[in-house]
Image (spheres, rainbow, N blue to C red):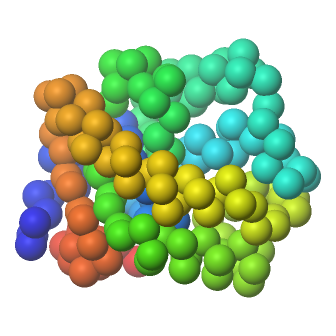
Amino acid sequence: MLTPPPLESLGKRICVFGPSNSGKSTLTWAIASKIGTTPVSLDQLRFLPNTDWQLCPDEDFARLHDQAIADESWVIEGNYMTLLTTRIARATGIILLGTDRWTAFGRYLRRTLFERERHGHLQGAHDSIKWDMIHFILVEQPRKRQRDIGLLRATGLPMVQLESMRELNAAYATWGLG
């Protein structure tokens, strides 16, 4: 996609999906700021603050998720396909990011080691390199890509698919995002 459609075509409840370290959080905060709504990071709901990314109980996560999507407008980032049905039922548009596994891996290393303050970072997190995360980025995530694309397209919602940093940067420019 060379020129994305107008941001307004995605409505006021936008889901941002994509691989880990593809730019979901930064894009979510930029869009939310532009349209004057709440940015929501599903990682911040799923994991306990002030930990090394320790999961909160499933029931708590589902409750926090449902509270977030009950609002009249939002931009929410994260995949968490187990809660996809309820999120999509409220969504008005989808943005799907893509990146190759090696770029995502490099970004993971940089963010974990050097970027303590960034959008989507878990409050008070004690980041460390995790072999499970490396395996997820390099092996599991690419295997799920076509499934996820199919699931999101099947929703029938307006969808923008940005497969590279070049396309993502073009969207920032077209949508007037900082």
Is residue 57 shown left or right of residue 133? right
Task: Give the side of residue 170 with respect to residue 78, left or right.
Answer: left
- Height in image: 155 above or below 161? above
Would you place residue 127 above or below residue 63 in this image?
below
Q: Position of residue 33 (x, y in %)?
A: 46, 60
Q: Please indicate whether residue 8 sits to the left or right of residue 82 in the image.
A: left
The front one of 117 and 32 is 117
In the rendered view of the protein, which quadrant contains the N terminus?
Answer: bottom left
Q: Position of residue 101 (x, y in %)?
A: 42, 68
Residue 71 in view in this figure: no
Where is residue 89 shown, x and y percent of the image?
Answer: 34, 19
In the figure, 36 relative to 22: above or below?
Answer: above
- Residue at left 76%, top 68%? 129
Depth order, front residue of 38/80: 80
Q: Quadrant of residue 157?
A: top left
Number of on-image labels: 0
Which residue sits at x=81%, y=67%? 128
Residue drawn at x 64%, y 81% as measured from the top left: 110
Instruction: Please determine whether, in this image, residue 65 is positioned above or below residue 167.
Output: above
* Residue 99 position in % (x across, y down): 35, 68
